[in-house]
């Protein structure tokens, strides 16, 4: 099997739907998030992250550290993720001013690096003696990983290697500690594994690959490692005593793990790193482990919106089929991580289901994580909210019915920004002789293998993608499983290309026009009866978009509605007044009267009506409002 | 308005349904629970409660306290509730051996009382200096209250006053501290208020009434009381810092409280005490407050099963209409407390809704709290369980799908026992000239006002109650709101008695036969659309019994079922093989096939079928099993 790789960040100029989002990232999100990092944004949580780096440099020089360190122990990673988002944004939209801002931030960061390569402002400012004593909660490897990702992205886009060199030195410091000096330990929060793989691809430094493999292969081999670390160190951040191996996926060696457990972002990052190593090294036992974990997630523990990690307790995976709509966790970052995992699985094997899940997560949970104006964010993505209960009741206090501006733990907003800005890398991949189209994303794409085309599509609202081939070759286009039928036309003639594991393979020549048309019929979706909360309910989908019913479109109350599963489904005209400008869907329904008392023996009157649904990613943009994805079927 | 009072414990000899339960309490529950208290029961949590009293007596004599104190800080109350249950059981079934056992336990308890009247083994054994320093968590007043209730019950049934004298001395000790010496403070866990009212009725000691009023009237007047106590005392049991006034209903003066908040058992006991004082003193502002709280509970915060306190977080009330079926708390004790509250509201005003709620709580949540064999108990009473998720998933880890034997915090089992053993007191009440029939409970009843009858009924399975009048007078029988129609016959002749606020008033003479027939038609019930989790669902009721659907009767899977709201409802024949021997109900339904994958766009096949429901109180008696009360309607 030939391995495909993601394209470079600069190889894709997006247009249309994705392009609009990338422009929002450039115009609003990147500048806004930078102002937050510099504590210049109004009415939001204090960040202090830039100042932390400045103060760390003071500490290294033995100077007064002014107002010291502020924020989460992993605060540094906010700066890293912002640099990464800014870098990818520069690939989409070159901007000298932004580049200068990034350069100056990199200068500040470089000053905060210790002589031995160590880089972490929390420990540098607060207590250098505690370095590496708390891998469970200290997040030094997590922060290092994010800064490595930032370094690679900025180097890839601009060719500037200052941060890359900083992080190569940092990687060498980590290599010395954990490999040369043989200190025991694995990351409490996986992330550095996938980042080291990026470093390896960027620098060809074999220590990076060796270190990534070391962390993955050591994980869970001594299941008591974190418990012992806790006992020996005498300090803690959050009181995690390391007894639950499940929480940080360290209870068993990774190749023996068969169920996705614990903190969903940790899990997603770990599995991404594992799949990445497997694709690079051809380690089949590792890929087999990834496949088992992938199947456990996508066949038993994933929401229809591509959300994962259903419980607030540990922001974690729960048990099979435990996918409540109202007490949901579904962290935005976890769906970003699921996209990472899917993209690395595609680098092992080109299979439609990986792309299907990637787009499910992207078009629903990831996009819903951000207000349409780019200014507010969801950390948690419920599938049902009730004003007056959601965000208030103890079991769903985390399920906010509206997006806040920023969070003290600000992982999700920059994660969404970097993902969207680099969407080209997820949309397209390549092998020596093939261009892979995983997602339908309009724009120009230049593959390293020479193939070049321009994709035109109004996806996910129109279901034809037309590839204007500039430099021909073999093109593989994913045919999503949701598309019951499809047509492929080459220069206007219908063809029947070979379909292999969900991808249509077409040979093209320079100047060809390849058009793929998928089935954009809106359809009802049903969940397994093993998911208790979906019992008796249906959802509404069109292509990759999951729809939802909001009160504002439905007389204020969606809980009184039941939708006729045998009724008609009508796609409405484009409506610019709907949030973001979208196409609503109308279905036959009936509305139940309320009871006179809390409980009643009188059968409530039902009235035939229409119910209106809008795409889930647009929800919560029109004020406090009921919302549900899964609605009663009659 | 003439106030009715509950009858004395010995005034009622029960038969039939209630009698069978009372016999179970006598034969199984009282002996089993006593063996637990003495640490003589196999395979259960250690109690140590009797030994705590013995060790406290040692401590008072300055002797070695052997193995010291063990258990919850309120462990004493388990002994108290057991004595109360045993006392009421003695009223039903005189038993010299049991009486001797109680006497000897009372001797042990009396020895544990300090010279000044103080009685609490935790503080006496562990740290006398800390007495009264932690009203928030120390539970001294809570334990005192339960022991007062036990003392009153044992005195009422046997005429023996040893424990009553102990507790009168204890009450005087409390009076001195909080009234004579003017120490600030109210109970962290209300209970002593209602107990002091019992003491007052038993002893006529006005200090008891004064003290009960003092605790109720002081509550929430200084909303910072508990916070200050926490700051000043320097020790804590569970880390409650007193900042949440809502948790223990101390955020506002009780007359200003309009919503039922916080720990549901605390709330129920407090409101019971308030209603009790209001009925005794004619304090209208207090009764008005009770009515507001009653309405808030019964119209917005109560399950159809009479369960209250919907969230595990604080075992507490949540917000209005937040009544999830699967993450339910619904502590058995909270429904017992709701029955107490209802019974005291009836002593203020004879209104059908109070009796309706009392029987809703009794026949559903309270009875479901106990295995049919009397040997296992639920603390938490969900309305839906899924093996593999319930009891395992973090959000419903407390919702066990099967009853455990005993709990470290063993409040519920003896609470159910004392309630059932004294059910006569809740079923019947009286005023100077009227006998009130609140619940339909077969047996002989002798009222202090001279009226005497024998009630024959197979309620809740047959809906005629026949009162054979031995000594006539005015009889008031509750006509439940669920009974759409009813007939009243006096000596075989239909009559149309006056109905006042849900009670039929009938004048009877010696030798009369009064027969009330209610509507026993099984019916579907509907919840308000404001309760999100009931959207699209219906329940099935017959009289006071709420039914539920268990997997064992329905091909293993109740989540695939939808019931036809317009279909037929068939009451099945009595089936002795069903748990406890009961009448199932069959309804028209359809069963949905499972989807092939987790989510599917293919409409699953539906097959017409019948669904079988059994009374909720019988659920969980046939092994691990799906269960749901609210089922999809089609």
Image (cartoon, coloured by chain):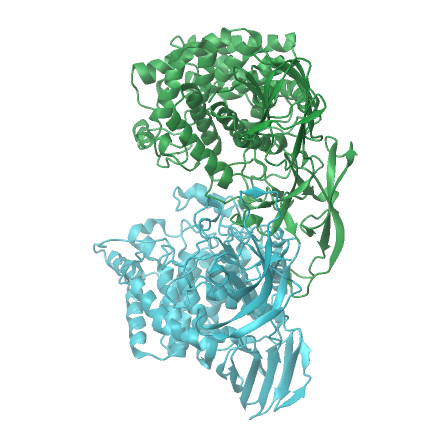
Chain colours: A green, B cyan
In the rendered image, residue B513, in percent from the top left (x then y), is placed at: 57, 89
Foreground of the two, A375 or A184:
A184
Give the farthest residue toward the bottom: B511
Q: From the viewer's side, name the closer residue of B633 and B540.
A: B633
Residue A25 figure quarter: top right
How many numbered dots are placed on residues in this image? 0
Whether B366 is drawn above or below A480: the answer is: below
Looking at the picture, tell me which residue is in the foreground, B580 or A440: A440
Taking the spot 60% from the left edge, 18% from the top edge, the residue there is A34
Quarter of image, res B505: bottom right
- The answer to whether one can see residue B118 in this image is no
Place of residue B168 in the rendered image (x, y in percent of width and height, measured from the top left): 40, 67
* B97 up-or-down from A609: above or below: below
**In the picture, which quadrant includes the C terminus of chain A?**
bottom right
Q: Position of residue B571 (x, y in %)?
A: 56, 72
Position in image of residue A226 (x %, y %): 34, 30
Q: Is residue B203 above or below residue A554?
A: below
Q: Is residue A137 visible?
A: yes
């Amino acid at each position: 099997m030939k391995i495909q790789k993601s394209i470079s960040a600069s190889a894709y100029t997006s247009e249309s739907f994705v392009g609009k989002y990338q422009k929002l990232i450039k115009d609003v999100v990147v500048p806004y998030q930078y102002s937050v990092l510099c504590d210049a944004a109004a009415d939001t949580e204090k960040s202090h992250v830039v100042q932390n780096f400045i103060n760390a440099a003071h500490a290294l020089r033995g100077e007064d550290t002014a107002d010291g360190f502020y924020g989460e122990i992993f605060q540094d990673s906010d700066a890293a993720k912002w640099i990464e988002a800014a870098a990818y944004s520069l690939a989409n939209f070159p901007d000298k001013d932004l580049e200068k801002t990034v350069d100056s931030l990199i200068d500040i960061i470089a000053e905060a690096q210790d002589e031995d390569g160590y880089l972490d402002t929390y420990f540098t400012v607060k207590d250098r003696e505690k370095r590496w004593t708390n891998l469970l909660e200290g997040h030094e490897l997590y922060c290092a990983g994010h800064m490595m990702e930032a370094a690679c992205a900025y180097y890839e886009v601009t060719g500037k290697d200052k941060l890359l060199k900083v992080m190569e030195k940092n990687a060498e410091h980590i290599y010395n500690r954990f490999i040369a000096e043989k200190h025991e330990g694995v990351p409490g929060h996986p992330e550095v594994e996938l980042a080291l793989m990026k470093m390896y691809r960027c620098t060809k430094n074999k220590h990076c690959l060796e270190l990534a493999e070391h962390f993955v292969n050591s994980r869970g081999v001594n299941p008591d490692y974190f418990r012992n670390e806790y006992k020996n160190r005498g300090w803690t951040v959050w009181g995690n005593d390391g007894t639950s191996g499940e929480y940080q996926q360290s209870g068993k060696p990774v190749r023996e793990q068969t169920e996705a457990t614990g903190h969903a972002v940790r899990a997603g990052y770990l599995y991404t790193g594992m799949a990445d190593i497997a694709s690079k090294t051809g380690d089949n036992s590792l890929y087999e482990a990834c496949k088992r974990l992938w199947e456990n997630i996508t066949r038993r523990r994933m929401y229809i919106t591509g959300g994962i990690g259903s419980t607030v307790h540990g922001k974690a995976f729960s048990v099979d089929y435990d996918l409540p709509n109202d007490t949901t966790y579904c962290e935005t970052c976890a769906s970003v991580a699921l996209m990472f995992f899917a993209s690395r699985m595609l680098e092992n094997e080109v299979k439609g289901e990986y792309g299907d899940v990637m787009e499910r997560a992207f078009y629903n949970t990831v996009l819903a994580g951000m207000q349409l104006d780019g200014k507010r964010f969801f950390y948690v993505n419920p599938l049902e909210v009730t004003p007056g209960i959601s965000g208030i009741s103890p079991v769903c206090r985390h399920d906010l019915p509206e997006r806040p501006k920023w969070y003290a733990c600000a992982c999700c907003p920059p994660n969404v920004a970097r993902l969207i800005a680099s969407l080209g890398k997820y949309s397209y991949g390549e092998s020596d002789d093939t261009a892979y189209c995983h997602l339908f994303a309009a724009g120009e794409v230049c593959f390293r293998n020479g193939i070049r085309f321009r994709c035109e599509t109004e996806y996910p609202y129109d279901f034809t993608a037309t590839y204007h081939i500039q430099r021909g070759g073999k093109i593989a286009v994913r045919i999503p499983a949701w598309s019951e039928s499809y047509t492929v036309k080459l220069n206007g003639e219908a063809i029947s290309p070979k379909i292999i594991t969900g991808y249509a393979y077409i040979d093209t020549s320079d100047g060809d026009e390849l058009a793929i048309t998928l089935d954009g019929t809106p359809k009802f979706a049903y969940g397994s009866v093993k998911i208790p909360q979906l019992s008796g309910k249906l959802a509404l989908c069109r292509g990759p978009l999951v729809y939802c019913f909001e009160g504002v479109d439905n007389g204020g109350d969606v809980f009184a509605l039941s939708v006729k599963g045998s009724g008609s489904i009508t796609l409405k005209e484009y409506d610019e007044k709907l949030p973001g400008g979208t196409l609503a869907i109308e279905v036959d329904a009936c509305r139940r009267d309320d009871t006179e008392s809390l409980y009643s023996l009188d059968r409530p009157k039902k009235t035939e009506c229409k119910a209106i649904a809008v795409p889930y990613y647009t929800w919560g943009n029109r004020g406090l409002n009921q919302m549900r994805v899964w609605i009663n079927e009659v």
